Image (tube, rainbow, N blue to C red):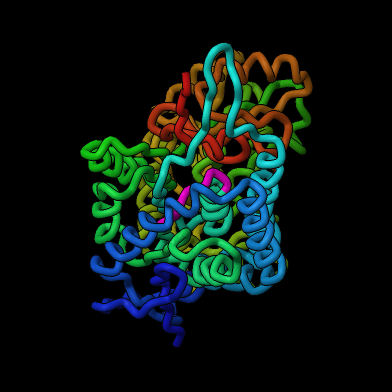
Amino acid sequence: MIKVNNTYINGSFQKPDSISYLDLVNPSNEEIYGVLECTSVHDLEKAIYAAFIAQSVCMNLSVAERKNILLQILTGIVKRREEIAEMIMLEMGAPINLSKNAHIQMGIDHLENTIHVLDEYKFESNENGYKILKMPIGVAALITPWNWPLNQTLTKISSAIGAGCSIVMKPSEYCPLSSKIIAEIIDASDLPKGGFNMVNGHGSDLGPIISEHKMIDMISFTGSTEVGINIQQLAAKTIKRVSLELGGKSAHIICDDVDLTKAIPNAINQCFINSGQSCSAPTRLLVPENDLEKIKDIAKNHVESIITGDPFNEDTNLGPVINSKQFESIQSHIKNALETGCELVSGGIGRPDIFKNGYYIKPTIFANMSNNHQIAQEEIFGPVLSIITYKNLSEAVSIANDSQYGLSSYITSKDEGVAYKIAKQIKAGQTIINRISRGSVPAPFGGFKMSGNGREHGVFGLEEYLEIKAII
């Protein structure tokens, strides 16, 4: 039984002064593998104060010193890559090949990209009659999710350190093992004491205090839209900056000029990666109505080739979802789709037949449905795809935009000029054309509408943590 203490304050791990525990459950077999010692409210206050005191030191670090700290963290991540991958596999059930590659590599990419930005970025510039200074905003609270724990954590940490901000991080309580390793790596770096602090426990206990606290100047949150709204409301009392990366219901438009035997399997893989637990996943597949029957056959055949199984098996494509709450929520959405007349192409209710326990979901595809169905409008956060038909590209764009969300979008077309014209009409923070993913490019990431505000990655991610000062 693992006992995890993730209360890290002012340069050391500290025993919480009033311990409550959270059971840590392996999603692949539902067995408790450890307990998390939850940070107390008193310890949270100490962490915030430590960051507040350290801010005057962090803001005066030279750009070279900030880059060196990020390089030290990068070296630590690379050195412990295999260990981190195993922890992510245990705590969230991600298949080992996905953990070792996508999960780790995206975090590395964010560190490298921020280092490259710092090579060129001008924190001071002379304009016509005035000078512009770009200064750290202050103490940054980073609230990170469980679905891509290294990716989302390191993009926030790299930008905050690069900007000269001190940090209070609250990672997901479902992923304490990988976050502990990150804290250990930062502890070994030259970041000044108090420049990084970590608290861990129930978000409902710690989140409101972070959101309202007068010593915190900024909150960067990745998670559900519901929680994001609550954070923004509480943060308004102190007029702090709030950067939100929230839910999504991304559309993938398949144009009528593509090879469907390649495009449809790619689209399914894009949706189902990480067991469908990605806010930017293209969960609405928009296809030409004349090709629907062919597309259903291709989809059904491809899903039969997907291996849902033990995360330790290197052949596994899909592992379990994170916990029982997510499992039951996804089951409820699938049941609703069946009851409201959506056609089941593959998958359905319950676990795959080979599993008696574990939070495994049958990879599920629905067709012959409208964009108004609940399953086409609500974020499922599991391996569930909705196939929706369109008559022409104008209607496809209209369907894509008919959502409260606007995080990401995808287009597959032989004609990239046409795809670009479509992309300009889609109300989403990013559009990916003819690619499996965004890859390692430092393009900004963030949402329109109920998918949030602010941007992460690269230059735009760095600037979230900066204030602009004019000297005249």
Q: Is residue 244 visible?
A: yes
Q: Residue 72 falls in which quadrant of the image?
A: bottom right
Percent from the top left, x then y, of residue 189? 60, 66
Percent from the top left, x then y, of residue 451? 43, 34
**Is 382 placed left or right of 46 in the picture?**
right
Q: Is residue 285 visible?
A: no
Q: Residue at x 36, y 37 (%)?
A: 241
165 part of magenta stretch? yes
Residue extending furthest toward the left: 237
Residue extending furthest toward the bottom: 1
Question: Which part of the image, by quadrant, shows the N terminus?
Answer: bottom left
Q: Residue at x 42, y 45 (%)?
A: 220
Percent from the top left, x then y, of residue 68? 67, 56
**Is 18 placed left or right of 458 in the picture?**
left
104 over 394 or under it: above or below: below
Residue numbers of the magenta segment? 162-168
87 part of magenta stretch? no
Q: Nearer the viewer, residue 375 or 81?
A: 81
Q: Nearer the viewer, residue 290 or 278?
A: 278
Q: Residue at x 62, y 58 (%)?
A: 69
391 over 385 or under it: above or below: above
Q: Residue at x 62, y 31 (%)?
A: 410
Report the label total. Answer: 0
Q: Residue 102 falls in which quadrant of the image?
A: bottom right
